[in-house]
Image: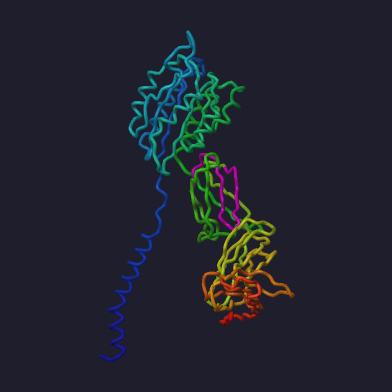
Amino acid sequence: MGQKQKTLFNLKLILPIIVLVLFLFSCLSLSAQPKPNIKPLTRIEFVFDASFSMFGQWQSGMKIDIAKRMLIEFLDSIKGVDNLEIALRCYGHQHSLRPERDCKDTKLEVPFGKDNFLAIKNKLKNIYPKGTTPIAYSLEQCAADFPTTSSKTVRNIIILITDGIEECDGDPCAVSLALQKKGIILKPFIIGIGLDQSFINSFGCVGKFYDASNESTFKTILNVVISQALNNTTVQVNLNDLAGRPSETDVDMTFYDQTSGIIRYNYMHTINNKGVPDTIILDPIGTYRMVVHTIPKVEKKDITLIAGKHNIIAVDAPQGYINMKVEGKNNPQCIVRKMDEMNTLHIQLFNTQEKYIVGKYDLEILTLPRIKLEKVDVGQSKTTTIEIPQAGTVNITKPSEGPGSLYVLENNKMVFVCNLNANIMQESILLQPGKYRIEYRPKNAKESVYTIERDFKIESGIITPLRLY
């Protein structure tokens, strides 16, 4: 067999092995990719108004009869939805208005469960209006209705169905806000049944209010509310450069619940294969505060999403680079501050490159002596290079222990650099190139006249021996 034939024969043997290895590698790479977010468990508590006013007439019949019928029909439509648990709390249905109203007339009639649709429907059929409207107290009691869990993949939601406002001196707005701040519930939904127009403004601070002015509207609103409660929506975050183009990317974004301060989502911003910011998934319920972890960070508050639509969140985040360079193995740190501000934004190592929001910065390089650079300009998509000389080393040998100080000589002045270690006799110090002076006194020499003074010079990459005797 010729050499060429042997080579072809060997390739035929090796090629299938290479293909197999590549296939296995690709499978392992795919399996190593993080899995998409698991659909969260949604708990919905229906808080149903069964106060005396629900006997009122509403189009084709009494409010209580229409509301019960439509809610029962609606429950049939969501039966079988994955990752859903529901509960029913009613108020105003246990005690009549006479001899006096009962402002604690509320009860969890059916606790949370996955297969309790029939139990809720049967309970609704046997609910009859009797008493008053303790909305604030009922909402407060809801806190204990939701099972306690530490999981971040659980969404607790209240849907309040009512035909009237608070009648018991409670503050539904304050209670709702407190529950949201504690992270017990997301922003509630309120469906008003034939409410007096003067009452409608009372619910804006409680949650997201929907006015069901007629029967058909009530049915539509139930579908809209449940759609928001069960489904996430798509969002695109545009990190705009100075020209207003969404070209900035590769930075982490945190979405906080603006009311509770709880972290809802974290995403690493990405430009997808189509060259546009990648689509992310967010819960449409609630108000967000977004922090983009650029240097310095960029923040946007009061973000509300429109459910069922593709939302675009735009923030200005123009960035450029600072590249820090030094020769040798020693990589000093640099404190980066916004110009004329003392707060530390970042500590950057030399021989690294970092992104910063466009602007001017003050740098303090932690060499000996320290190097301070003011008003360093970072331009859009430009790289500002900061290069410092390589340090040299002074090896100090003392005749005995004792105090000493090191100074750099500038314009016939001694500028303090550092103190020597008074407890050792040999010391090595990294210094920037320049002219220096050392002042030292042996520990046992109790007179100032015994002060030893030496001048020396440091060059880049050179070790300078210095004997103080």
Quarter of the C terminus within the rendering: bottom right
262 up-or-down from 114: above or below: below
Query: In x, y percent, where is residue 198?
Result: 62, 22
Q: Quadrant of the N terminus?
A: bottom left
Residue 233 magenta-drawn? Answer: no
> Which of these two is toward me, 24 or 430?
430
Residue in front for this viewpoint, 292 or 372: 372
**Residue 239 sits above or below residue 395 on the image:** above
Residue 110 at x, y = what percent?
A: 37, 26
Residues rendered magenta in the picture: 282-303
* Residue ID at (50%, 56%): 268
- Nearer to me, 390 or 300: 390
Q: In the drawing, does residue 375 fall left or right of residue 323?
A: right
Q: Position of residue 238 (x, y in %)?
A: 58, 54
* Residue at (41, 38) in percent of width and height: 42
Is residue 412 depicted above or below 299 in this figure? Answer: below
Q: How many marks?
A: 0
